[in-house]
Image (cartoon, rainbow, N blue to C red):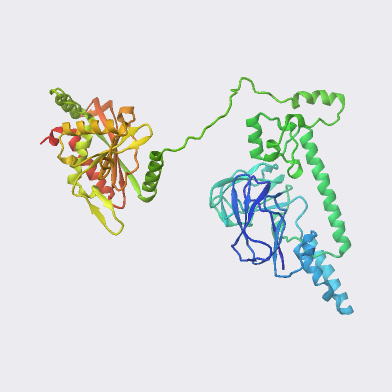
């Protein structure tokens, strides 16, 4: 039997969808799980998969066209199957019933008995129908890949009054936790899935209806699929259409009379942001409900005129309908420009992106007492023609610590780990177009003054774009210092093929405890980013302890 596929509701606020692209064409074989089309919602473009197998017999919405939720999207069935009845609006059950009516007319006596039985059955089924005004709410499909949902929170409890547009619950899907709103009004009679509980799509989530309804009878009832004769069918259709028209008229009047306004949460939020009075907006959703497109397409000149009312009531409603105009709001012009990326910026993006998404980073932070370092630096800089910075001391300490912890001075090689027996420290230098990392070769063998002079020379030539490629290659470890900008603590991305990079913060004065007393101390935070493929957590921690001992006792670096 052919299956009718309707435009799905792929998000909680979706009122209509647009077919961005069909991935199957009429006549193609469709398997369960195949992607039929890409559908654009109010939030994103999503893949829509088939839950049926067969041949794609009909496409109801062409590429680029939009249609409301539940509009005929496609028909899947057996190759060559007659779908004319479905295209004319008949249900699959009715088409199947119609196709088998010829066989049912054979044998008069048998037919009379069957007809009597059928009428009795029909009467029984009608009596088991869901009572008028009662709605069974099922677990919705809130994303294109959602198979089941979990009720994170119920915002209503059994016995609460529910209005159309109220948020019933927060439902956790495979992608996010979303608010699920009610499209019906009444009393919450039953909760089918408790908080924290999970259930497949289309499981009974809740029942809403008039207070006092027998919930057990509703849950056990099944909608009737058989009818006594064609006349009763047409009567029911006319009655349904009539009720629908009356209901729609009533809802539209409710909006127009300035009472409760039916509006989706997204549309309400947009209206507040734009300062639009919802009383002036015509709703195009179900029962006159105001949806996103109504706010987007709203023009003040199209505000609906109030319905003719007696003079007294009109004069009372005029103040209600006047929109409150915000005053003293900033007014400006939005602008932007595109700047072509330099080659340096492209390389930085490429290399750091590769490092971040290929090397599993983790971070270790310690705080270093810099009182002795400050005193030692002052003594060194008192010597003639000598200038040493705190960064020079950090670079020297890093190099010496690497000799004691060779695991940190490594490179990941896939099947092997490459241990570097030499120590080449890269020093990150900011330039106008980005960042460069000149390299100090054999840093562990350099004195503090040699490190200071070399860093000053390399940094100056880096800013003037005078560095050679050889001076920026071969680092085994990198130091990045933002302390001069007042940054107390930060993390860096490893400079591949290194296994680690040290981020150095500013020296700050703060209360510290020394010898059981609170005194003013000078501390500096450093953070080591490590590649977990080569450097384990304990190894990284031991390296930082050695680094701290050098910085807190600078004389040991001179021995």
The percent position of residue 387, horizontal first and vertical second, equals: 18, 26
Q: Look at the image and tell me whether residue 153 can be seen.
A: no
> As drawn, is 453 to the left or to the right of 314?
left
Q: How many marks?
A: 0
> As drawn, is 398 to the left or to the right of 28?
left
Write down the quadrant of residue 54 in the picture: bottom right
Residue 93, placed above or below residue 362: below
Name the one closer to the observer, 554 or 412.
412
- Farthest left residue in view: 559
- Residue placed at 27% from the left, 26% from the top? 511
- Farthest top residue in view: 328
The percent position of residue 419, horizontal first and vertical second, equals: 22, 52
Q: Look at the image and tell me whether residue 124 can be seen.
A: yes
The percent position of residue 405, horizontal first and vertical second, equals: 20, 47
Name the one closer to the observer, 345 or 421.
345
- Residue placed at 22% from the left, 35% from the top? 394
Q: Where does the N terminus fall, quadrant-wise? A: bottom right
Q: Where does the C terminus fall, quadrant-wise? A: top left
> As drawn, is 447 to the left or to the right of 174?
left
The percent position of residue 177, horizontal first and vertical second, equals: 55, 46
């Amino acid at each position: 039997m052919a299956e009718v596929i309707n435009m799905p509701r792929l998000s909680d606020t979706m009122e209509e969808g647009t077919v961005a692209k069909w991935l199957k064409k009429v006549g193609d074989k469709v398997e369960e799980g195949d992607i039929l089309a890409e559908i654009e919602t109010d939030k994103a473009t999503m893949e829509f998969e088939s839950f049926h197998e067969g041949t794609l017999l009909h496409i109801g919405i062409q590429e680029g066209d939009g249609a409301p939720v539940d509009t005929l999207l496609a028909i899947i069935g057996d190759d060559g199957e007659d779908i004319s009845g479905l295209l004319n609006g008949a249900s699959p059950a009715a088409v199947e019933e119609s196709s088998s009516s010829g066989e049912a007319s054979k044998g008069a006596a048998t037919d009379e008995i069957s007809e009597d039985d059928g009428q009795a059955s029909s009467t029984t089924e009608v009596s088991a129908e869901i009572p008028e005004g009662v709605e069974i709410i099922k677990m919705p499909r809130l994303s294109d890949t959602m198979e089941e949902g979990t009720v994170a929170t119920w915002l209503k409890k059994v016995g609460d009054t529910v209005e159309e547009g109220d948020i019933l619950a927060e439902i956790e899907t495979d992608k996010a936790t979303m608010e699920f709103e009610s499209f019906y009004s009444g009393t919450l009679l039953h909760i089918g899935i408790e908080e924290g509980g999970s259930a497949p799509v289309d499981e009974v989530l809740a029942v809403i209806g008039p207070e006092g309804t027998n919930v057990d009878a509703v849950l056990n009832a099944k909608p009737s699929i058989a009818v006594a004769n064609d006349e009763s069918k047409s009567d029911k259709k006319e009655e349904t259409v009539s009720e629908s028209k009356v209901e729609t008229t009533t809802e539209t009047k409710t909006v127009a009379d300035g009472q409760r306004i039916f509006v989706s949460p997204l549309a309400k939020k947009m209206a507040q942001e734009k300062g639009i009075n919802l009383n002036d907006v015509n709703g195009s959703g179900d029962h006159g409900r105001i949806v996103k497109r109504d706010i987007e397409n709203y023009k003040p000149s199209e505000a609906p005129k109030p319905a003719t009312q007696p003079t007294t009531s009109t004069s009372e409603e005029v103040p209600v309908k006047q929109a409150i105009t915000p005053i003293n709001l900033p007014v400006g012009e939005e602008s932007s420009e595109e700047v072509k990326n330099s080659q340096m910026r492209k390389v930085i993006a490429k290399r750091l992106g590769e490092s971040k998404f290929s090397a599993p980073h983790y971070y270790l932070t310690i705080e270093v007492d810099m009182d002795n370092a400050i005193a030692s630096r002052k003594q060194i800089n008192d010597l003639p023609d000598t200038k040493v910075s705190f960064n020079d001391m950090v670079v020297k300490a890093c190099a010496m610590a690497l000799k004691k912890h060779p695991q940190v001075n490594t490179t990941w090689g896939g099947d092997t780990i490459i241990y570097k027996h030499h120590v080449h420290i890269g020093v990150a230098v900011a330039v106008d177009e980005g960042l460069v990392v000149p390299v100090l070769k054999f840093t562990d063998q350099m004195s503090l003054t040699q490190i200071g002079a070399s860093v000053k020379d390399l940094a100056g030539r880096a800013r003037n774009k005078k560095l050679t490629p050889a001076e920026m290659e071969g680092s085994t470890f990198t130091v990045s210092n933002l302390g001069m900008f007042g940054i107390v603590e930060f993390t860096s991305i490893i400079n591949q093929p290194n296994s680690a990079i040290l981020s150095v913060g500013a020296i700050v004065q703060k209360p510290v405890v020394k010898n059981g007393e609170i005194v003013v101390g000078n501390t500096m935070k450093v953070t080591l980013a490590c590649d977990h493929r080569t450097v384990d957590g304990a190894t990284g921690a031991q390296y930082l302890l050695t680094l701290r001992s050098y910085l807190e006792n600078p004389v040991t670096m001179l021995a």
